[in-house]
Image (cartoon, grey):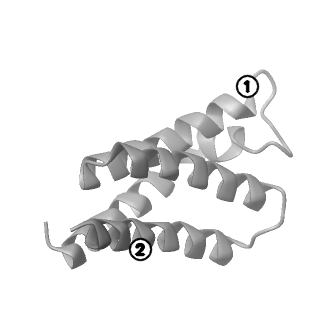
Amino acid sequence: MAHEHMLFVLVVAHFLCDFPLQGDFLAKAKNPEAPLPGVPWQWAMLAHAAMHDGAVLAVTGNLQMACMELCAHAAIDIEKCRGKLTFGGDQALHLACKLLYVLLVMWRA
């Protein structure tokens, strides 16, 4: 896959996973500062980050990058939930991760 095509697909997959596929339940349940009663926020965060992890694996075919995405996505979202990142900062960091994955693919080629 051409690198610019890979970046485009990673960005589209990000927007799909972060908006329509996340849904209202996960958006609320993953928040460690205001968890939903009876729902461990850690499980909700893991479920959300795993969707992104799977998207990165599907696009890149690289398990290490997928694991990086799982950890990075969860860490970024936790900081956003704690008020340490704005919505724009959160999205910028997520998209920077996608660019990093493409750069790593280019570097390995």
Residue holding disc 2: 99
Q: Is residue 19 above or below residue 107?
A: above
Q: Residue at x 50, y 74 (%)?
A: 96
Percent position of residue 8, x then y: 28, 73
Q: Is residue 56 above or below residue 104?
A: above
Residue holding disc 1: 39
Residue 82, located in which quarter of the rendered image? bottom right
The answer to whether residue 35 is seen in the rendering is yes
The answer to whether residue 19 is seen in the rendering is no
Point out which mark residue 58 bears: none
Q: Residue furthest front?
A: 108
Residue 1, located in which quarter of the rendered image? bottom left
- Nearer to us of marks 1 and 2 is 2
Q: Residue at x 78, y 33 (%)?
A: 36
Residue nearest the viewer, comparing 35 with 7: 7
**Mark earlier in primary sequence (1, 2):** 1
Give SS at disc 2: helix
Percent position of residue 16, x then y: 39, 57
In the figure, is residue 34 to the left or right of 86? Answer: right
In the figure, is residue 13 to the left or right of 67? Answer: left
Image quarter where the C terminus lies is bottom left
Q: Residue at x 68, y 53 (%)?
A: 75
**Which amino acid type corresponds to the residue marked 1 in the rendered image?**
Val
Q: Is residue 14 above or below residue 4?
A: above
Percent position of residue 28, x then y: 70, 44
Residue nearest the viewer, comparing 88 with 65: 65
Mark 2: few/some/many CA within 10 Å (<14, 14-19, 20+): some
**Which amino acid type corresponds to the residue marked 2 in the rendered image?**
Leu
